[in-house]
Image (tube, helix red, strand yellow):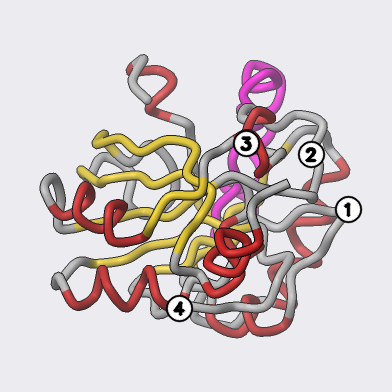
Amino acid sequence: MLPKEIQTEVEKGTMLPLMEEFYTIQGEGYHTGTAAYFIRIGGCDVGCHWCDVKESWNAALHPPTHINQIVENASKYSETVVITGGEPLTWDMTLLTQMLKDRNRRVHIETSGAYPLTGTWDWICLSPKKNKLPTQTVYDNAHELKVIIYNKHDFIFAEEQAEKVNQNAILFLQPEWSKKEEMTPLIVDYVMNNPKWRVSLQTHKYLNIP
């Protein structure tokens, strides 16, 4: 259990359970190939069985860190900052994003959308999950819909999600990494037959970078 005063700071969003932070190349979705500073916030109860960062799920494993320090670190490296997790919308993102915007940073989020939208964002990548569907605020504001394809049924799920997201969202299908040999050809065929979609690949894994 956290001391009460720290728990209060976490609830306000002035401290957040920081898992890791690193400067790298964006590997997925619309901004693939561009430099960005990633801030990975711990805590997620969505529980995808194929999640490749399950160590992020338990927020208690990651030390509450003051957002002043997080912003200071991020501002040294990149004009673009990506908040990811875990599920960052578990926490109130208002103060963190405000401070980053005050530093003239472009602020992106990668989220399942399972919780209501907080914060000020230049780009919202929504990657919905079946076991905890997005809230309406995220559907309404997402710039990008990225659906992970683990099996053939996920194409049906992708179309259901495309119906719910706002009409300006750019649509991506991405193979789950452990199924990439099986699913990538199916995605290619699907996109060719349904050209409203685009293909997303986890290029950072091919490049062997974070």
10 Å neighbourhood of mark 3: few (<14), some, or many (≥20)? many
Mark 1 or 3 closer to N-term?
3
The percent coordinates of residue 105 (x first, y second) are 19, 66
- Secondary structure at badge 3 equals helix
Q: Indicate the quadrant where residue 58 lies.
A: top right
Distance from Cα at disc 2 to Cα at disc 4: 26 Å
Q: Work out whether residue 172 or residue 2 is closer to the camera in this orientation and state it.
A: 2
Q: Quadrant of the C terminus?
A: top left
Question: Residue tagged by mark 4?
Answer: 94
Tell me if residue 58 comes above or below residue 100 in the rendering.
above
Within 10 angstroms of label 2, few (less than 14), some, or many (20 or more) residues?
some
Decide whether residue 193 is among the magenta residues. Answer: yes
Is there a contact, CB below 8 Å, between mark 1 and mark 2? yes
Label 4 is placed on what type of residue?
Thr
The three-letter code of the residue at mark 1 reads: Asn
Label 2: which residue? 48
Residue in view at x 60 percent, y 69 percent: 8
Task: Please state the horizontal and vertical placement of residue 26, each as a whole percent of the image.
Answer: 33, 41
Q: Residues within 10 Å of mark 4 (few under 14, many from 20)?
A: some
Query: Could you tell which of marks 1 and 2 lies nearer the N-terminus?
Result: 2
Q: Amino acid at mark 3?
A: Ser
Q: Which residue corresponds to mark 3?
A: 56
Q: Which residue is mark 1?
A: 131
Residue 101, placed above or below residue 52: below
Q: Earlier in the sequence, mark 3 or mark 4?
A: 3
Percent position of residue 67, x then y: 36, 60
Residue mark closest to the camera, 4 vs 1? 4
As measured in the structure, the alpha-carbon distance from the residue carrying label 2 to the one carrying label 3 is 12 Å
Mark 2 residue type = Cys
Q: Which residues are magenta?
A: 172-196
Distance Cα–Cα, label 1 vs label 2: 8 Å
